[in-house]
Amino acid sequence: MSEFFRMGGYAFYVWTSYGVVALVMTIEVIHNVLQQRREIRNLKRQLAHLKAAGSNGEHPHESKT
């Protein structure tokens, strides 16, 4: 069993590689979750703006000139 963890003398490189990959994958998941929350927040804000503009009888993209 200890030979498995020593990886024939390459354990440092092998386990470091596994660690780096795990870290990058974790960062990717966290980034995607945060980005999704940000996009949902922006979409809710846009929807609220459109609803508010629609209740005023205005078209949200028309200028008030």
Image (spheres, rainbow, N blue to C red):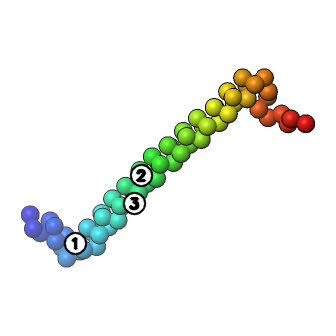
As displayed, is residue 62 above or below residue 36? above
Q: Give the residue number, with chain letter if any, for mark 1.
A: 11
Instruction: Say which residue appears at 77% left-offset and 32% top-offset.
Output: 60
Chain-order first, disc 3 or disc 2: 3
Distance between the Cα atoms at labels 3 and 1? 20 Å
Please tell me whether mark 3 sits on a helix, a strand or a loop: helix
Chain-order first, disc 3 or disc 1: 1
Chain-order first, disc 1 or disc 2: 1
Q: Amino acid at mark 2?
A: Ile
Of the numbered discs in the image, which one, if any, rests on residue 24? 3
Instruction: Say which residue appears at 39% left-offset and 60% top-offset.
Output: 24
Distance between the Cα atoms at labels 1 and 2? 28 Å
Q: Give the residue number, with chain letter if any, for mark 2.
A: 30
Find the residue positioned furthest to the right.
65
Q: Amino acid at mark 3?
A: Val
Question: Residue 47: where, in percent of width, then height?
Answer: 64, 32
